[in-house]
Image (cartoon, coloured by chain):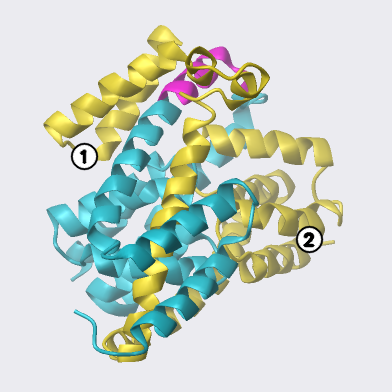
Amino acid sequence: MLRELIKLFFIFFRIGAFTFGGGYAMIPILEREFVTDRGWITSEDMLNYVAIGQSTPGIIAVNMATFIGHRRYGFLGALFSTVGVITPSLIIISIIAAFISNFSEYIYVQKALSGINIAVAVILTSAVLDLGKKSICDIVGLALAIVSFVAVVVFDVNSIWLILFALIVGIAVKGGRKTK
Amino acid sequence: MNILTLCISFFLTGLFAIGGGLAAIPIMQQFIVDRGWIEPELFYNMIAVSESTPGPIGVNMATYIGFEHYGVLGGIATTAALTLPSFVIILIIARSYARFQDNPLVKSGLYGIRAAVCGLIASAAYSVLSVTVLTPESFILAPSLFTLFDFKQLLIYAVIFALYKIFKKHPIWYIIFGAVCGIAFL
């Protein structure tokens, strides 16, 4: 058991070390690790976790780590994966705070970051296409996705309102009937 | 002002920041900057540092401020305080998730929510596109196909996209490759 927990710690450590550009950028990496490679959860579960993470307090990366770790190995799983995902930041920022001033002004840091951002853009656009195919199954879903996109990009609406709205629309449309 | 009040401030940040990293910034402003734990200028500087290092912005900020005031253990303590609320809340939800996920009402709600989440991920994709491949500022000044794109970045985007689709390797490899391209060409 301890072996699996340590492995879980390092999986999340690696994810924490490579998540640039905010919580959403983590989703394709999580999809790859836990849906495609390991089959621990489904894409549907993952989007549900994201939705729950977005509508409850706290950091999305921590929410996802806690959820997936708990799903796999209960409380200890949640603990090891959460500590795993935040440890890289802890180490990197401590080093920067101790030794490096003006870190983000170094030219090579800026260049590397511009390149990383392009890679993140690729990964995210590809995730939108994949997840969209899997989770938007009708015109109502498509409308909800478009409304959410426009509301955030154009009107800067906090995502919690969109999730609440989608929840209400979902219940109104499906009316609690059995869905596939 | 001592380490306990600093931890409580980060605990409150963790408790009230709903909706991801950027939602934490105004809350940290209120609990951390306005209470004098960090100079406003340094706070904005740290946002830039957080954007150039991996990991959640809240964790980066907690570690930095904790470290500056109380060393390594301070950084660990503030980070733990920040993450504790999410951890506990999600544990509680995760325990009942299996029981509720098949409830028809919950299923209908989640059907709607998953679609909205796709829209939210698309907005994240747009925001990173708009600082790389797309140049919305120059497009607004002179709308045309040539002012909409940064062609050098568009080319790198197309190459990485093609490699991603062809080889289907772990996303981390493309992030490393992106960093290399950035250093070599940008």
Indicate whether B120 appears above or below A18: below
- Label 2 CA crowd tier, 10 Å (few <14, some 14–19, many 20+): some
| Nearer the observer, A26 or A87 | A26
* The N terminus of chain B, quarter of image: bottom right
- Label 1 CA crowd tier, 10 Å (few <14, some 14–19, many 20+): some
Residue A78 seen anywhere in this rendered image of the structure: no
Q: Is B10 left, or right, of B42 in this rendering? A: left
Q: Looking at the rendered structure, which numbered label has been put on residue B31?
A: 2
Tell me the colour chain B is drawn in. Answer: yellow
Residue B16: x %, y % from top left: 66, 69
Which of the 4 image quadrants contains residue B45?
top right
Tell me the colour chain A is drawn in. Answer: cyan
Judged from the image, the secondary structure of the residue bearing numbered disc 2 is helix
Amino acid carrying label 2: it is: Phe
Earlier sequence position, callout 2 versus callout 1: 2
Is B129 in the magenta?
Answer: no
Q: Is B10 left, or right, of B143 in this rendering? A: right
Judged from the image, the secondary structure of the residue bearing numbered disc 1 is loop
Main SS, magenta residues: helix
Indicate whether A122 appears above or below B14: above
Callout 2 touching callout 1 (CB < 8 Å): no
Amino acid carrying label 1: it is: His
Residue underneath mark 1? B170
Q: Is A164 left, or right, of B29 in this rendering? A: left
Residue B40: x %, y % from top left: 82, 41
Q: Is A59 left, or right, of A48 in this rendering? A: right
Tag 2 and tag 1 share a subunit = yes
Which range is magenta?
A: A105-115
| Nearer the observer, B36 or B70 | B36
